[in-house]
Amino acid sequence: MTTFKRAANRRKFLAGGASVALVGMASPAILSAQEALVQDGPATEALRRNISSFRVNDWRDHFESLKGGVILSDTTSRMIQYWSEDESIYKVYPTSVPLSDDLTRLGYTSIIKKVVGPSWAPTPAMKRRNPEWPDYVGPGPDNPLGTHALYLSWTYYRIHGTNDTRKIGRKSSNGCIGLFNEQIAELFELAEVGTQVKLI
């Protein structure tokens, strides 16, 4: 395989092919995707670091049941896994994660609200750190939450899209979990209010 084709495969995986829909357990397909990423070729050092922490989790290690579907956000691997209640749908998405440990909240929560075209306002802590930031940003291309947002039971925490695709795969958020807009739109349709969520 040529270097160009390998690079194209990596871009395809990161931009849209990282969503894996499978029936039952999907480990072989996910590992194949990982192997495709780590072939020799012109990968950035940041991408190599991201890949090195890639791991597949089993929902049984984190949830008692799949009632209402579950979302597992792995802040080390920088990815989300989604399982539907009947296990007929399984998805994996690359994500952005919080910039630092003090901004990262781990544990169990759930989706309490779903919003298409969310507005955004910095939290009081964000505003103290960045007083130059606007007090409010409406829906649109400048909105940090992208096109869709899943609001969690934790105040200020969201799983959302981003209009800045450079953030995906990196420590780049102030606490939220970010996805490509195309992928948060898909997860938005799959997840329900009440869907169980865990950040690890």
Image (tube, helix red, strand yellow):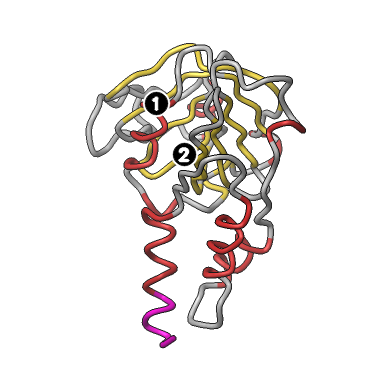
Q: Quadrant of residue 136?
A: top left
Residue 129 vs 157, above or below: the answer is: below
Q: Residue at x 62, y 44 (%)?
A: 25
Residue 95 vs 193, above or below: the answer is: below
Say which of 127 and 12 sits in front.
12
Say which of 158 and 73 sits in front.
73
Q: Residue at x 61, y 36 (%)?
A: 73
**Mostly what secondary structure, the magenta segment?**
helix
Say which of 1 and 26 sits in front.
26
Say which of 157 and 133 sits in front.
157
Residue 199: image location, x then y, percent: 66, 31
- Magenta residue check for 103: no
Amino acid type, callout 1:
Ala
- Magenta residue check for 4: yes
Residue ranking furthest to the left: 140
User: Which structural element holds mark 1?
Assistant: strand
Q: Residues within 10 Å of mark 2 (few under 14, many from 20)?
A: many
Reading the image, the residue beneath label 2 is 178
Q: Which residues are magenta?
A: 1-7
Q: Residue at x 44, y 86 (%)?
A: 1
Residue ranking furthest to the bottom: 2
**Residue 110 — which label?**
none
Residue 176: image location, x then y, percent: 53, 32
Q: Which quarter of the image is occupied by the C terminus?
A: top right
Q: CA distance from mark 2 to mark 1?
A: 9 Å
Residue 188: image location, x then y, percent: 39, 27
Reading the image, the residue beneath label 1 is 149
Amino acid type, callout 2:
Gly
